[in-house]
Image (cartoon, helix red, strand yellow):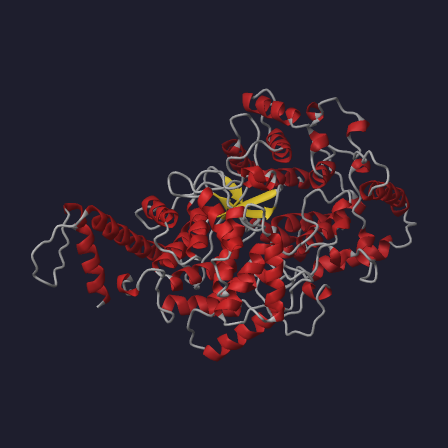
């Protein structure tokens, strides 16, 4: 039956161009179609054909174990940092380095610099890191490409304008004085929760990066290289450019922490002479903390910065290269590399749980049966990834709830997160398994665990509960813009979407609080800020979809305002696009080349209003169908994922192919059932 429907659909489509509809099942006289009818039928045929192609493509991408994973593509800094690390370590593979040089030059911009997102301007940290890596690799400074890079680096302010972590890496190879690197004291781990601001008030990812950095900061294992960066100081190498500048107003938190940093520097002198009263204990605790979190993970926190820092820290502690922990740390770091004959690129981490959950939702919504063998296999894989361990989240959220949750990566048992958990639960509720009781128990555990993370103001954050003490953003080493893990509209709305599908009432106290939070976060123009996707298109889509799932009246003025904003930023080609510069200045919101993923988000946002005849919505569907590749995929170069706003962005390669399918399916499901073909 399904095959005959598909065949008739294609028969109908193939005859549209001639102006006649021929259904081979019934011998009828040909009837001429009006232009409007012909366009309507062609629109629906293209919609369903695009759905089929997308389904087939995604199913072909499934791994034999049952999961999906797309590459996470980032800027050039990971390769640059790795080149510098190999020179610090004294372990240089010339062939690998040749490929790294090729990669860096391939990402150099026309003006000579390097950026941190596709289409973005040159950025000071990425540019100086790229220049340094090439210089370490032996590229002559007289090379025209190096001369252009040097000009850009100086124009951007040179070495003094780099952030703290970048300066620390320079200090490791003797290119920046340690005395001007803000201190990351080991003793921070000794501060208990009784202290107003303590170690556990930092974000999950900052803790993982800072503990090994505190070890490195203690030992200062400088291994000088044979190059300098003196040419990248605009005013010449002078101490006045090295120290962090205080605020003009003397009575500020920043100035207090700068004074505290000088006090730490004084204490460092005692530590170096082994008369620091707490340093030995603190150092031992940092080492223990780090080694504990190697267990059950693919490297510390399973993310590149923490993994690289931990490997350097182990070597600074005196672990030999053949020690099992060093071997393992180096192995996990190496797994992030993609090496070809002429190039090497590095992922910041892997995203199999996140990608698998998204693809499952897309396939199921588009009509793949819940008991399809591929769907069941993926559901079983996800269930096996549930974290039944009480990880670091317990320090901020010591509730009596059974441990559960999911992570982004393959293995990272200390750090399950709310966002991945919500996405997995959205997927599990849609599929069948051979173990329905196990799935139901898994679902309920994860749901109760996730609900325990609601913050005081009604929203949800990514990893921790109420990780919002702004004072931490004033410490000198907080310039990576990632010290906190604040609640955000996109994650909160995704949780409401799940609860709405599960039939929770808007009168439930937690939902009431979440709705108040979302209202408070709406921008004046009707949009919402997107923390984990770029940017206002992402946030607005997720809020509208979440509220629609809760059966909120979508005709309220504040929601119609959001719809009007989405329609106002649609491009002439029918698509939507937005670049990462919106995090620097919201004046750019909704501007940028159209992309498949962001068009899909906008389409789903408009679908929340249940109006399939909305011209903007139909133009969005036409854009997705028109730009689809013959194999069912979409091409996308832009960066649409957010790591740390203003600092680090990601291109999720799975986004370009998964979200458009969900958008097409969401629109198809608005149409009368008589025009919805049965799934294969």
Q: Nearer the viewer, residue 80 or 112?
A: 112
**Residue at the extreme bottom of the image, as rendered:** 437
Q: Nearer the viewer, residue 40 or 264?
A: 40
Which quarter of the figure is the N terminus placed in? Answer: bottom left
- How many numbered badges does the structure rendering display? 0
Q: Is residue 332 left or right of residue 594?
A: right
Q: Nearer the viewer, residue 88 or 381?
A: 381
Q: Position of residue 124 (x, y in %)?
A: 64, 32
On screen, residue 173 above or below 194: above
For the point 37% across and 58% down, the residue is 665
For the point 38% across and 43% down, the residue is 574
Q: Position of residue 578 (x, y in %)?
A: 50, 41
Q: Do we see residue 566 in this rendering?
A: yes
Q: Do we see residue 412 in this rendering?
A: no
For the point 70% across and 30% down, the residue is 159
On screen, residue 548 above or below 656: below
Q: Position of residue 78 (x, y in %)?
A: 59, 42
Q: Position of residue 606 (x, y in %)?
A: 43, 53
Which quarter of the figure is the C terminus placed in? Answer: bottom left
Q: Quadrant of residue 395?
A: bottom right
Q: Is residue 171 left or right of residue 42?
A: right
Q: Quadrant of residue 161?
A: top right
On screen, residue 43 above or below 7: above
**Residue at the extreme front of the image, as rendered:** 557
């Amino acid at each position: 039956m399904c095959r005959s429907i598909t065949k008739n659909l294609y028969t109908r489509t193939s005859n549209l161009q001639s102006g006649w509809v021929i259904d081979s099942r019934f011998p009828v006289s040909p009837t001429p179609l009006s232009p409007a009818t012909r366009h309507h039928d062609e629109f629906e045929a293209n919609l369903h054909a695009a759905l089929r192609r997308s389904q087939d493509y995604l199913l072909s991408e499934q791994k034999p174990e049952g999961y999906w994973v797309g590459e996470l593509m980032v800027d050039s800094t990971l390769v640059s940092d790795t080149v510098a690390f190999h020179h610090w370590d004294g372990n240089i593979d010339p062939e690998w380095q040749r490929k790294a040089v090729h990669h860096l030059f391939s990402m150099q911009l026309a003006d000579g610099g390097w950026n941190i997102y596709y289409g973005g301007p040159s950025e000071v940290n990425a540019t100086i890191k790229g220049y340094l890596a090439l210089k370490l690799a032996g590229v002559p400074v007289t090379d025209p490409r190096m001369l252009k890079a040097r000009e850009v680096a100086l124009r951007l302010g040179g070495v003094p304008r780099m952030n703290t972590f970048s300066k620390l890496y320079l200090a490791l190879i003797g290119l920046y004085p340690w005395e001007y690197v803000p201190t990351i004291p080991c003793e921070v781990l000794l501060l208990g929760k009784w202290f107003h601001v303590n170690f556990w008030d930092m974000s999950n990812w900052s803790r993982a990066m800072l503990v090994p950095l505190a070890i490195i900061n203690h030992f200062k294992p400088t291994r000088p290289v044979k190059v300098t960066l003196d040419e990248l100081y605009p005013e010449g190498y002078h101490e006045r450019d090295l120290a962090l500048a205080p605020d003009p107003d003397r009575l500020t938190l920043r100035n207090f922490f700068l004074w505290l940093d000088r006090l730490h520097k004084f204490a460092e002198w005692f530590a170096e002479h082994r008369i620091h009263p707490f340093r030995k204990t603190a150092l031992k605790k940092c080492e223990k903390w780090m080694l504990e979190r190697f267990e059950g993970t693919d490297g510390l926190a399973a993310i590149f910065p923490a993994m690289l820092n931990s490997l350097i820290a182990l070597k600074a502690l005196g672990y030999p290269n053949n020690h099992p922990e060093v071997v393992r740390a180096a192995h996990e770091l190496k797994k992030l590399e993609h090496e070809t004959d002429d190039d090497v690129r590095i992922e910041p981490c892997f995203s199999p749980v996140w990608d698998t959950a998204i693809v499952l939702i897309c396939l199921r919504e588009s009509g793949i049966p819940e008991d399809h063998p591929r769907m069941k296999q993926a559901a079983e894989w996800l269930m096996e990834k549930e974290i039944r361990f009480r990880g670091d989240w317990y320090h901020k959220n010591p509730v009596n709830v059974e441990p559960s949750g999911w992570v982004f990566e393959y293995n990272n048992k200390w750090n399950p997160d709310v966002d991945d958990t919500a996405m997995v639960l959205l997927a599990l509720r849609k599929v069948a398994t051979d173990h329905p009781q196990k799935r139901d128990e898994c679902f309920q555990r994860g749901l109760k665990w996730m609900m325990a993370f609601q913050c005081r103001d009604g929203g949800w954050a990514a990893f921790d509960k109420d990780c919002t003490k702004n004072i931490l953003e004033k410490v000198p080493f907080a310039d990576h813009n990632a010290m906190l893990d604040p609640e955000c509209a996109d994650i909160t709305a995704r949780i409401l979407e799940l609860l709405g599908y599960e039939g929770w009432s808007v009168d439930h106290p937690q939902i009431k609080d979440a709705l108040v939070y979302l209202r408070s976060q709406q921008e004046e123009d009707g949009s919402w800020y997107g923390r984990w996707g770029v940017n206002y298109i992402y946030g607005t889509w997720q809020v509208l979809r979440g509220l629609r799932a809760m059966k909120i009246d979508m005709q309220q003025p504040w929601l119609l305002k959001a719809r009007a904003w989405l329609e106002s930023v649609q491009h002439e080609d029918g698509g939507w696009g937005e670049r990462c510069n919106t995090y620097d200045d919201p004046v750019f919101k909704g501007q940028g080349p159209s992309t498949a993923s962001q068009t899909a988000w906008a389409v789903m946002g408009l679908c929340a209003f249940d109006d399939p005849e909305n011209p903007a919505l139909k133009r969005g569907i036409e854009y997705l169908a028109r730009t689809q590749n013959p194999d069912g995929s979409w091409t996308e170069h832009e960066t649409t994922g957010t790591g740390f706003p203003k600092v680090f962005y990601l291109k999720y390669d799975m986004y370009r192919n998964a979200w458009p399918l969900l958008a097409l399916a969401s629109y198809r499901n608005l149409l009368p059932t008589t025009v919805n073909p049965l799934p294969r």
